[in-house]
Amino acid sequence: MGTSDIVLERVQALLKVDTGNGNLHEHLVRLSRKLAEGKPGEALSQLETLSRHLKKSNFRGVRASDEAIAIVADAEAEENRLQWCGDILKLVRQPSDPTASPKVLGAVQNFLEESAMFRWAGVGFSQQESYHIGASLRGLASDTPSIESLRLWGKVLGTDGDYLVAEGVLKSIPKAPDAPEKPPMLPDAPEFDVEARGEGANQFTYWVSCGGCSPWVRLPAARASQVVAARSIKHILSGNLDAPVLSMPWYPGKERHLLRAQIARISATCTLAPKGWYEEDDAEGAAGKIREVEAPTEAFPGQEELASDAGWVHRMPCLNKIGKCSYPDVDALTGAELISEELAKEWSAKIEAEGELKGLLAGIDGDLAEVKPEGDEGNVVGWSYKVFGDKGLYGGDAAKSHQVTGVRSMVWPGATTVAQGTKFSNIYIGYAMKCGTLLPPNPQTGLPLIGGTDPFSPLVPDDIMDEPNDLEEHDEPNPGEDDVASLGESVDPAEEDA
């Protein structure tokens, strides 16, 4: 065998070496066959491209996964968006575990259904946000088994953040049959400042949230001293429950306490119900409480009544001057010799100066009677009414209407009550500030209602300095000399003698 044959065999062996994806000999054969079949016009210029395609088609290894790198302008904002989406998915998920026994929740307001009435009246939230609020309320009821009923009270606006406010009723603790009767509470006791749960200003319990999927935080009970102090200041909330209340005069508490006091004031004034829907509860131990009547929809006021003061009553008891819904029982305290005669006389004078308080389920036609002009009893002062939607009547004998009646408070802008058919609901959306600019002045004094009103709408200009008095003209001290000097003549006595 010659040297040339040995070299040729070595070249053939080198061409047939398989590296796992074929050998060079097979590749050249396939490349030649492809050129013979395709017969391209410029085979030389397409040789590299065709060879690369043949190599890719003959690749037998595991392909590496391409790493996808997201290109975002703001990585932090994208991370927050993904976090929000994840939280919303958790929010709308069913609160109970499918594998466990279902939870029994309290009566939770179907806010998505009632939000349609609010949108007709021009208040409320979008449909998506309303759905999120309803899911959030359901989650709160699931996490708090002691809740009997729950609804959205409203939204309080702030400078740095807002508060969604939920209103609920907690299950009452049954009283033992052999439990002794509690003695009358002393007016100077610390417990007198806070009404018991389920009574007066603490008839309901409130929770606040920043909205979306933020957790709910329970607010403290309303205190009478904080309610009285809230009437003397004007303060816009910041959205931070632990923020101090910087005001003059000083407020005894933080922002969470001021928020709770304002909720108590707004609820006592602006929570309405159709006339005849509730009645006083005459059960034993239920003094000062109300309940729904049997078949309340049968006596529901008509459309014309709902658009006037005659169709509405106050759902909550009013707050008196000491920030509560009741005064101490002076007679019981005196009979038990728990207070002195001087203190009893002092409290009796306070109660007499207060006058007769509005009773339970008092009509709103008597609101702000002191500013209504004489001879115009039908003048709407405290409330404004407007009808929205289709005003037609449908049906046979029992005519049905789809119109929505909106009732807005002129004292607390943002408090709205809507009614449609035999359904009604209350909501508040505002800065939790009282406003007096929407009311007429006092007919006796001519002055507007002032005291803790909305700072965005001042009632009267601030006091300014009095105008200075006009300057009085005085005679000149030497009129003769000044007149001669002004004419350019000499007043030297020597020149006159000469």
Image (cartoon, rainbow, N blue to C red):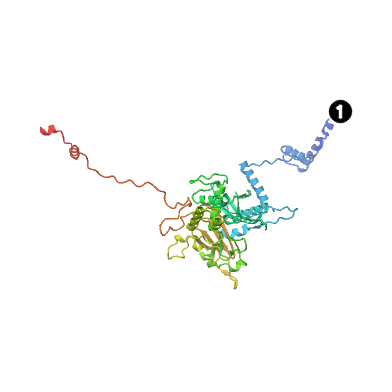
Side (left or right) of 150 relative to 235: right
Q: Residue placed at 48% from the left, 62% from the top?
A: 380
Q: In this orientation, does residue 419 appear?
A: yes
Give the amino acid at mark 1: Ile
Q: Residue placed at 63% from the left, 44% from the top?
A: 80
In this view of the protein, which residue sits in the foreground, 495 or 446? 446
* Quadrant position of the N terminus in the picture: top right
In this view of the protein, which residue sits in the foreground, 161 or 274? 274
Q: Secondary structure at mark 1?
A: helix
Please tell me whether residue 354 is drawn above or below residue 63 in the rendered image.
below
Q: Position of residue 494 (x, y in %)?
A: 13, 32
Side (left or right) of 124 relative to 447: right
Circle 1 residue: 6
Please tell me whether residue 248 is drawn above or below residue 177 in the rendered image.
above
Which residue is at the far bottom?
Answer: 397
Which residue is at the far top?
Answer: 3
In this view of the protein, which residue sits in the foreground, 17 or 118? 118
